[in-house]
Amino acid sequence: MDGIFECIVARKTPVYALPAKIGMSLVLSIIVLASIFIHPLFFLIACVFGVFMYFMIPRFNLEWEYTFLDGELRIDKIFSQSSRKRFLVLLFDRVDTVAPLNHDDIKRNLNNPGFTKVDCSSASGDESGVYGILYSDEKSRKVILFEPDEKMLKALRRYSPRKVTVAQ
C-alpha cells in the first residue's frame, strides 16, 4: 500500500478556557501591582507566573493529527497550530477492531475497567463521525476515540479489511 494518509481534527475549545485565561491574567496583574506597591520580590513571582502562562495558554487550543503509513497509525497533538507533540503510535498488528462508537465491541469495552479510554476526538458532542480503536499492547488495553475522514477510513480498511468496520 503506497501513500501517506493524514487527517487533522480541531478539538473543541473547553468551556473553562476563557475564564481560565482571564483568571490567570488577573492574577498576573495583581502580582505585578504587588511588586510595585508592596515589595519588589513579587516581581520574581510575576516572572515565574508569566512563564507558566506562556506555556499553559497555548494548551487550550488543541488539534489532533492522525497519520497512517505502512501499518502504523500515529496520533500527534498540535498546540496553537505551532507546537507538535507525538501522542500515540499504534501498530496495526495489535489493533483488534476499528469501528464506530455504536458498534457492539466498542460499546462493550468503552466503560470496561480493564480498558483505558483515550479521547483523541474533537469532543464536539456529535458522535456520528467518532470511531473507536480497540488496541492491546504488552502494557495495557485501550479504547482510543478518534475522528478519521473518508480517505483515512478507506486506507485503514484497505490495509486490514477484517479489523475495520465503516458506518453506513
Image (tube, grey):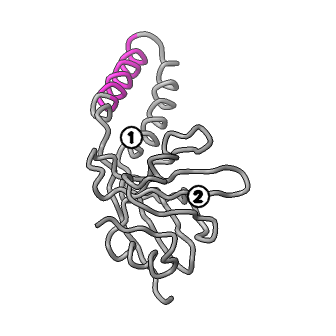
Q: Is residue 107 above or below residue 160?
A: above
The part of the image, by quadrant, that contains residue 57 is: top left
* Mark found first going from the N terminus, 1 or 2: 1
Q: Residue at x 64, y 57 (%)?
A: 136
Instruction: Give the x, y percent position of residue 162.
Output: 51, 74
Q: As drawn, which residue projects farthest toward the right?
A: 138
The answer for how far apart the CA atoms under marks 1 and 2 are is 32 Å
Secondary structure type for disc 1: helix
Q: Residue at x 63, y 65 (%)?
A: 94
Instruction: Give the x, y percent position of residue 149.
Output: 33, 69
Amino acid type, residue under disc 1 in the picture:
Ile
- Tell whether 149 sits left or right of 162: left
Q: Are marks 1 and 2 in contact (CB under 8 Å)?
A: no
Instruction: Give the x, y percent position of residue 88.
Output: 56, 59
Q: Nearer the viewer, mark 1 or mark 2?
A: 2
Q: Which residue is mark 1?
A: 57
Q: Which mark is residue 135?
A: 2
- Tell whether 20 sits left or right of 65: left
The part of the image, by quadrant, that contains residue 27 is: top left
Q: Residue at x 57, y 63 (%)?
A: 96
Q: Residue at x 45, y 82 (%)?
A: 158
Q: Is residue 20 above or below residue 134?
A: above
> Is 21 colored magenta in this rendering?
yes
